Image: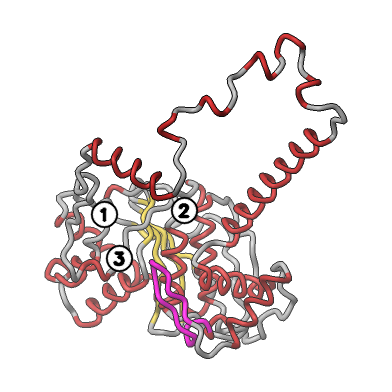
Amino acid sequence: MSTAPSSTSSSNLPDELDAEVDRILHDKNFTSNSELYRLQSRDFNTLNPTGWLNDNVIDAYISLVAQTTPPDITIVPSFINSAIRSARISGMRMRENDVLFRLTKPYPNLMNSRLILMPINIGNTHWMAGAINLRTRTLTLYDSSQSAYQHHHEDIFWGIRNWLVNEGKRRQQPLRDLKLTAPQIPVPQQLNSYDCGIFTINFILACLQGNDSFAFNQSECSYLRRKMCWELAKGKLLKQSLDEKQSQVSKLNSLNVEKEDVGSSTLPLSSSLPEKLSISESEPPLAAAPQDLLTNSDQEVDALLLQEVEEMNIDPEANSKLDPYTKEDLELQPESHHLANESLDIAPEIY
């Protein structure tokens, strides 16, 4: 496998975001405390140009992506496959692996999913992505260093196959079998020994977005690293942030246009109306508002609102959400779901 350096092309992030990324990567005490994950400076350091992404970064980014995806696809964190691999190495039978089934407990719709996606770690040396199509009962592995790690594919397949078959039995949703299939489209290959995590994340994103090809390559890894850094630090995806910003700009522009339209008239507003619809004859003056709304202080307003709430007799427990899991289970990542195009789900060839 070639060890050519990653691309050093300049970032395509907006200048202000690029400056934020520099600050984050140089801050030895930086911590991101999201509701979904907690990352420290040592985790963000893996997003530097030649860093090898650790499981904290991989799983945090997956949990972030999961918040914006539809429900018929499940994406599971990397520790699921790590538990599968550990069970195979130790010789433990899947049906006896209570730890693994406890880890998958927060995913009640797992076996109802159309597609299950997972990042796969091989002995802390390599990342690849797995896509399980439960409709066709196939597993496809997207590997950015296939020539070096293809000999691991069969072992990965048997671990995942045995896990899902027994998972189905536990949930009384039997899966008859699973087959290993080759990717249907060309899979980009990394040109170094450390960008596998970046490729893996973007393989999963391509499946989620329903792309019929992988529209990225080695030359974009520098940008993708910095983009991930900003997103993980802010706890939201860059596209989502830019869309929100554009929406705010559009609303502001709309308000400015309305102000300009009103201010452009040289006549008084009442003069621009037809005589039969003059202000004095159309609507009552503001003084005609109900007397119970004409309060003289914020305290009076609060008192009125409190009185209304009390009269509504609202049960404070009415909207409480039942949690079917134990306290220990709450420490696991929440369930995540995603949607992908069928073109990335099925491949014609079998290894």
Q: Which mark is residue 160?
A: 3
Going by the numbered disc 2, the residue's amino acid type is Thr
What residue is rendered at 85% in x and 34% in y?
264
Going by the numbered disc 3, the residue's amino acid type is Ile
The alpha-carbon separation of the residues under discs 3 and 1 comes to 11 Å
The alpha-carbon separation of the residues under discs 1 and 2 comes to 31 Å
The correct choice, above or below, for 323 with respect to 10 in the image is above
The correct choice, above or below, for 14 with respect to 127 in the image is above
The correct choice, above or below, for 78 with respect to 64 in the image is below
Depth check, front residue: 172 or 238: 238
Residue 113, x across and y down, in percent: 33, 49
Q: Quadrant of the C terminus?
A: bottom left
Left or right of residue 197, residue 251 in this image: right
Identify the secondary structure beneath mark 2.
loop
Going by the numbered disc 1, the residue's amino acid type is Asp
Q: Which mark is residue 68?
A: 2
Left or right of residue 138, residue 242 in this image: right
Is mark 1 in CB contact (under 8 Å) with mark 2?
no
Q: Which mark is residue 177?
A: 1
Left or right of residue 214, residue 262 in this image: right
* Among the 4 quarters of the image, the one containing residue 63: bottom left
**View extreme (right): residue:** 266
What residue is rendered at 16% in x and 53% in y?
171
Identify the secondary structure beneath mark 3.
helix
Identify the secondary structure beneath mark 1.
loop
**In front of the other: label 3 or label 1?**
3
